[in-house]
Image (tube, rainbow, N blue to C red):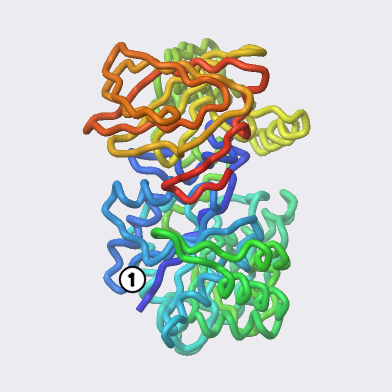
Amino acid sequence: MIIPVILSGGSGSRLWPLSRETYPKQFLPLVNQHTLLQNTVLRIAGLSEAAAPLVVCNEEHRFMVAEQLRTIGIQPTAAILEPVGRNTAPAVAVAALYAQREGADPILLILPADHVITDVEGFRAAVRQAAPQAVAGRLITFGIAPQAPETGYGYIKAGPPLEDAESGIGAVDCFVEKPDAVTAQRYLDAGGYYWNSGMFMFRASAFLAELERLAPAMLASCQQALATGRADRDFLWLGREAFAACPKDSIDYAVMEKTAQAAVMPLAVGWSDVGSWAALWEVGKRDDDGNLLRGDVIAVDTHNTYVDASTRLVATVGTDNLVVVETADAVLVANKDRVQEVKAVVDQLKTSQRTEGRNHRKVYRPWGSYDLIDADQRFQVKRITVAPGARLSSQMHHHRAEHWVVVRGAARVTRGDETFLLAENQSTYIPVGVRHRLENPGKIPLEMVEVQSGSYLSEDDIVRYDDAYGRES
């Protein structure tokens, strides 16, 4: 049996402003109607040898993961929640430990949630061909046949083919760091070098045995994090203290570069890690002028340009080789050859403590979403959407009052000791310090306008008494 392990912990900062810390690129529909996470899961759903996926993700993203899998009809084996990011090696370790419950020792197929593969059948065939080597105890890494002297990826140098292997599976000679342009061209000319895709396949026991030998402190922390964790709804929460104490390292550095059991499976399946706007332009469908245009765009004398208009009309005139990305609260304009530097913008946003690096104007919650329409020093206006049957926590605010106006659907409001219904065009007022709750008892989304007023309006002014989603105050 093969258990796909979907690693969904990335932040995708190089795809800012669409990708944000609280809503990173794996949850975005960047190449078709499905998100990158959904495409990853659907890619292996057609693999008959594969069981339901096991997802490892950030605590903050758990409801987005659950909802996106639900909408494509996938029930995961489990969703393991990381309280803090510790890179890929600990994430794979807790997945392998979990997969061994009840004495099982499955093959694990490790897949980042944010990659694009255009030749899905070719990828599935490669997984099947690599499986016997994984069964035999090899740690398989999938190497991408390079199409250009790429300097943004690490490389794998392949050794001689394995005697009993199919399709060119070979021992790994060595892993090499991201090269400069001259070195990358030399790798391309020499042959036998592959881009390091970050996808792996091995028995759970084989990986854990090497981790115990090479990084025993990491394994011990992961074991403790599972032992002190808790199951809640469809989620498995890792023990916070134990996992936070775990050494932070990638699976490459912790195991693959040091093990004698590594083998490389060459792949030529239209792979991209979508690590930049230029990479997204490369994999997308472009028009006759080389443009990839999404949203409401008018392009005049425009060439080789990527434009994404999320909320309003964007027009370009006489441009070439640009990336233009528009959202409700930010606009990016960059030369396509320098899009790797977008991360520097995100770093500046963090340094200056601006929210645009972390949140979109529209923020998703397990019960629905809110969109910050307007704000000043002593007021905020939000458009709130509550899903049918959902409810917010029972809560109180020390510093703000709230005015609610229902514009669509119906609301059940608890305010202090009273509970009442509001229909469209009706409103109510929640004074400072009064316990309250908002629910949607109907079958259509509840939409309302909330006006907050007070001396302090940040989201941390919430005292939660009761919450259906396991959130704490």
* Viewer-closest of 424 and 59: 424
Residue 419 on image: x %, y %:
34, 29
**At label 1, which amino acid type do we have?**
Ala
**Is residue 133 among the parts visible in the rendering?**
yes
Residue 391 on image: x %, y %:
37, 37
Numbered-mark total: 1
Left or right, 396 with reference to 406: right
**Mark 1 neighbour density, 10 Å: few (under 14) some (14–19) many (20 or more):** some
* Viewer-closest of 472 and 289: 472
Q: Which residue appears at 51% of the width and 54% of the height? A: 8
Q: Which residue extends farthest left?
A: 443
**132 up-or-down from 317: above or below:** below
Q: Which residue is mark 1?
A: 50
Left or right, 360 with reference to 367: right
SS at mark 1 in the image: loop
**203 up-or-down from 364: above or below:** below
Residue 258 on image: x %, y %:
70, 78
* Viewer-closest of 327 and 185: 327
**Is residue 369 among the parts visible in the rendering?**
no
